[in-house]
Image (cartoon, helix red, strand yellow):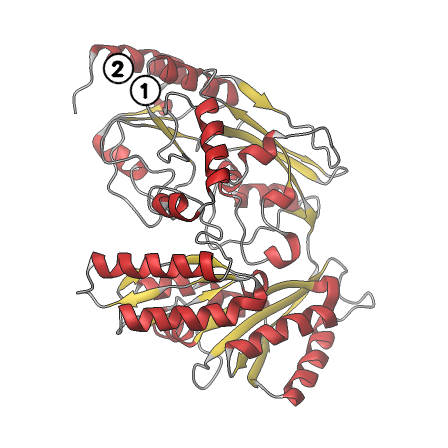
Amino acid sequence: MTLGDTEQALLGRIGARLGPRGLVLAAQDKQAYERSARHGGGRARAVVRPADEEELAWVVRALAEANMPMVVQGAATGLVGAGTPTSTGLQWVVSTQRLRDVLQIDPVNRSATVAAGYRLSDLNKAAQGHGLTFPIDLGSDPTLGGMVATNTGGARLIRYGGVRENLLDVQAVQVHPAGQRVGFSHGLRKNNTGLAWSQLLCGTFGAFGIVSRATVKLHPVQRQSATALIAVDAVETAISLVTDFEQAMGEFVSAFEGMSRGALEAVARHGPGGTMPFASAPEYAVLLEVSSAIPVGQGLDLEALLMAWLERCLEGGGIVDAVVDKPDQLWRLRHAVSESVQSLGRMVAFDLAVSRSRFAAFRAHALTLIEALIPHAQVCDFGHLGDGGIHLNLVVPAETSQEQIGALRTAVYRSVVEEFGGSFSAEHGVGPYNAEYFERFTEVPLRELAGALQRHCNPDRLLGNVRLD
């Protein structure tokens, strides 16, 4: 790949401004930025790595003024390719990994202002010293900028919500006007003065600007918890347990996860340290958790409350077995599902959501579609049952054609959106790998508005690899 005189001059300016750690040009070094957690194959023109917000604004201005297309990348943990360069080799990767100039904990306001390059684990390590946490529970360790861009959810959304519900302020850099810095880090919990940058930038996968800092709510560290894994005879039983569980446990409910027999069997066979707590994998199982910031020994015994609830539920039927164990043991099983399913063979993954009341009916319908279109697929679904999220993961025969997979994907997406009023991307966002479904299944007025905003913020299409119009 040959660089022209304009690009050579630009590289010289960037190298002089950012130093040797701020610019990656060697092909072998760029490879780490050309792949995401599940997808790859792109090629980066170059990788720039600004170290603070001022450098980020300068880089964006320099690239935009030279008419260079760019894609922003955090920890590359995304699953739809939104932070991965295209195969053209023309895009510059703007990496936020070195963007770590601010990490401030405000324990009185119970908030944190964090530069986009810090990871979730970095924030929680800093907050823990104040007895606080940012409780977005994930199997990966993304950057804060990426979490804002995708409105990350996770396993404890039933209690805390996703990033959007915990976002107070955002700062960002725009491509148009090139390098303009916008937003605040005031950390206000009440500010009813109209449209906010946090509303515009959260969950829009970087289409309108590059997140440089975020101010987020923090929550008290939970001092005690109790966890159970319950084997049930059907998904319908699991759904009925959700409402009963919430009514019985109230504000202590922090997670309600579902796992199918296929997912449990995958973990039993391949999971790192995952052991099946039952004699055999049940039809379906739910992992539930209660937690509190009240320390053990101060008048609250969550394990006793959970056990009493379980005993009552066992009398009602539908529960095949139940295990109450140390939280880390049961959560290890849950977090091992994705990796275990991938180890079985060729995986096809769906990230879907419906209302809880329609969860069982949609899942049954989806299984019918799978049987009709890819008869020998192994279904290993799991998900955040408490909020209606379902990761409908399949292991398909090696000879399955792309046409078959495409037909199934279209049928499932059409069903979840048009028949069940759900989402074709519950928490993974929109990127090149599902952009066609954004165009197909997003209502026209909303798509037109998103396109108008993108044309205003990014008129020359220099930022990102997804078109919203």
Along the polypeptide, which appears first: circle 2 or circle 1? 2
Alpha-carbon neighbours of circle 1 within 10 Å: few (<14), some, or many (≥20)? some
Residue 416 appears at what percent x and percent y? 45, 60
Q: Which residue is drawn at 64% across and 30% down?
A: 195
Dot 1: what SS?
A: loop
Q: Please state which of residues 70 and 356 is positioned toward the viewer in this rendering.
A: 356
User: What is the quadrant of the C terminus in the image?
Assistant: top left
Q: How crowded is mark 2: few (under 14 residues within 10 Å), some or many (20 or more)?
A: some
Residue 131, given in percent of the width and then of the height, sits at: 70, 48
Screen quadrant of the N terminus: top left
Residue 427 vertical placement versus 48 (above, below): below
- Viewer-nearest residue: 97 or 160: 160
Q: What residue type is labelled 2?
A: Glu
Q: Who is closer to the viewer here, 289 or 125?
A: 289
Q: For mark 2, give the secondary structure.
A: helix
Residue ID at (69%, 28%): 186
Q: In this view, does 312 lie to the left or right of 209?
A: right
Quadrant hosting residue 415: bottom left
> Can you identify the residue that label 1 sits on?
68
Is residue 205 visible to the viewer in this orientation of the structure?
no
434 to 56, vertically: above or below:
below
Residue holding disc 2:
7
Q: Is residue 16 visible?
A: yes
Q: Is residue 104 above or below residue 124?
A: above
Q: Where is residue 50 in the image (x, y as percent from the top left)?
A: 43, 23
Image position, residue 127 (x, y; %): 64, 43
Q: Residue at x 56, y 75 (%)?
A: 238
Q: Are marks 2 and 1 in contact (CB under 8 Å)?
A: yes
